[in-house]
Amino acid sequence: MKSFQKSYEFDYPWEKVTTANWMKYPNKSSTHVIAVDVLRRELQEHGNVLLTERLITISQNAPRWMSILVGNTNLAYVREVSTIDRRNRSMTMRSCNMTFPHILKCYETVTYAPHPKNPSTMTLFKQDAKFISGIPTQIFSRKVENWGVKRFSDNAMKGKVGFDSILEMFNDIWSNGNE
C-alpha cells in the first residue's frame, strides 16, 4: 500500500470554498476530468446535512506497460460521496475508483473545514489517498502503486491550480456585490 497526503490553506471562508467546489470541473487545468454526473442528492437531518453521490469520468493515457494490464481504454470512472454538514461547517468527500479495482484501488478522502487559526476567513483543505494493488506479484504490485501515486499527485496539482482559478473567478463575483 502507498499513500498520498496534502493540505492547503485557502484564503476564503468555508462557505465560499464549499460552494465553489461544486463548480470545480470543468476547468482549464484539469482536462483529464471529462464529466461529472450527479447520481443522487438528498437533504438529511432536517436539512442540515447534504449528501451527494457523483460519478466522475476521467480520460488519461496509461503507460504502455499499464495498457497491457487494463487494455487500451483511456476512460476511468470514480464514485464520489460527499457530505456537507452546515451545523459543524464540515465537508467530507470520499471517492474510490470503479475501473480496474482488481489491479489498483484508490481510496481518497478530502475534507474542507474552517481554518483553526482564522475560521471566519480561511478554509483548511486536507487530502488523503491510499493505493492498493491487487496484483499478486510484489514487483508489479509496487510498480502499479507507485504509478498510481505519481499520476494522482500530478492530477492533484492540476486540480489545485484549476480550483484556485475557480475561486478567483468566484471572488471577483463576490467582490462585485453579487454574493
Image (cartoon, grey):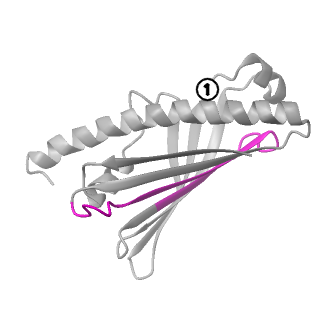
Residue 89 in the image: above or below residue 108: below
Where is 86 relative to 173, above or below? below
Q: Position of residue 147 (x, y in %)?
A: 69, 30
Q: Which residue is drawn at the image coordinates 15% and 54% (left, top)?
A: 179
Q: Nearer the viewer, residue 128 or 73?
A: 128
How many callouts does the rendering have?
A: 1
Task: Write the residue at 36% across / 45% down.
Answer: 23
Residue found 38% across the figure and 27% down from its top: 28
x and y, in percent, of residue 84 in the image: 42, 66
| Residue 73 falls in image quadrant | top right
Task: Identify the secondary structure beneath mark 1.
Answer: loop
- Find out whether residue 116 is within the magenta segment: yes
Residue 121 is a magenta residue: no
- Give, as a single range, the part of the protein colored magenta: 92-120
Q: Residue furthest left?
A: 177
Residue 64: horizontal and vertical position, in percent?
A: 75, 17
Outermost residue on the front side: it is: 117
User: Residue at the spot x=80%, y=25% of the render?
Assistant: 71
Compared with residue 87, is residue 66 higher up or lower down, i.e. above or below? above
Residue holding disc 1: 60
Q: Few, some or many C-alpha atoms within 10 Å of disc 1 (few <14, some 14-19, many ≥20)?
A: some
Q: Amino acid at mark 1?
A: Gln
In the image, residue 121 lies at what x, y percent? 21, 57
